[in-house]
Amino acid sequence: MGFYSNFSEKDLIESYTNQIDYQGKADKEIIAEILSRGSLEKFQAKINIQKSILNEQNRVIREIHGHYMNKLSKQECLQLIHSDLLTDKTINFLVETKYSQIHKNVENLKVDSETIIKAILGTFVSSAVSSVIIFILLYNFNFLIAFNLFLLIPVYIINYWIIRLFTGKTRVNLAVFIASFAATVLNCIYFFLIVA
């Protein structure tokens, strides 16, 4: 009973391909296990089929992305995409998933007037909240004063999360990034005004 005898077929394929990719050849023990389950040619054929399916999925995903960027609807995209290897159910799943992901990314990157207003409001609220939190920490734990510059990191994180709650967008959005940075600068100003 060898090391690979308890491997599922999927695990065996993954181990075999990793050995081929990284070592240039498979070791004798894995080849013996493959031969005990059938022929090496059938096993390699399964790997080639999996690679073909993966390549076809990537081709369809690129095509979906292009259709989305050309502002085609999901239904139009589904009518235009055809595949000999993928089922209609798989194509429908890919279109639904990718359209949803791309839409979320595009919406997240969009900087409109509503995002700017919410980011500005979030800047002032987050800088006030994070300043209060940091001042409470500094008051209760005097030894943190020695690390006041390092406290900018948690302050920035607190500011970012509050601004993210206000805008509903992540730091990839330029308005959220700038607002988080501005809130942290405000924290520094508050700190130096109170200390001085």
Image (tube, rainbow, N blue to C red):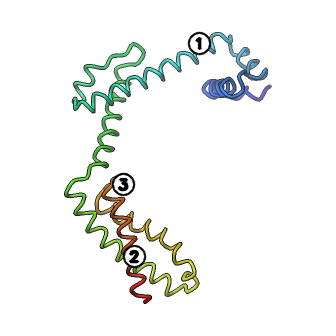
Q: Is residue 168 above or below residue 148?
A: above
Give the class, few, some or many, for how many residues have Cα within 10 Å of label 3's Cα (few <14, many ≥20): some
Going from N to C along the chain, the mark reached first, 2 or 3, is 3
**Cα distance, mark 3 to mark 1?**
44 Å
Between disc 3 and disc 1, the foreground one is 3
Badge 2 vs badge 3, beta-carbon distance below 8 Å = no
Residue 170 image label: 3
**Cα distance, mark 1 to mark 2?**
62 Å
Q: Please name the residue that numbered disc 2 is placed on.
A: 187
Find numbered disc 3 in the image and state the secondary structure of the residue it sits on: loop
Find numbered disc 1 in the image and state the secondary structure of the residue it sits on: helix
Amino acid type assigned to the residue bearing label 3 in the image: Thr
**Cα distance, mark 2 to mark 3?**
21 Å
Amino acid type assigned to the residue bearing label 2 in the image: Asn
- Residue 176 location (% of width, % of height): 33, 59
Q: Which quarter of the figure has residue 175?
A: bottom left
Find numbered disc 2 in the image and state the secondary structure of the residue it sits on: helix
Question: In the displayed image of the protein, which residue is found farthest to the left?
Answer: 113
Amino acid type assigned to the residue bearing label 1 in the image: Ala
Q: Is residue 69 above or below residue 122?
A: above
At a point 20% along the width and 58% down the height, the residue shown is 114
Between disc 1 and disc 2, the foreground one is 2
Q: Please name the residue that numbered disc 1 is placed on.
A: 45
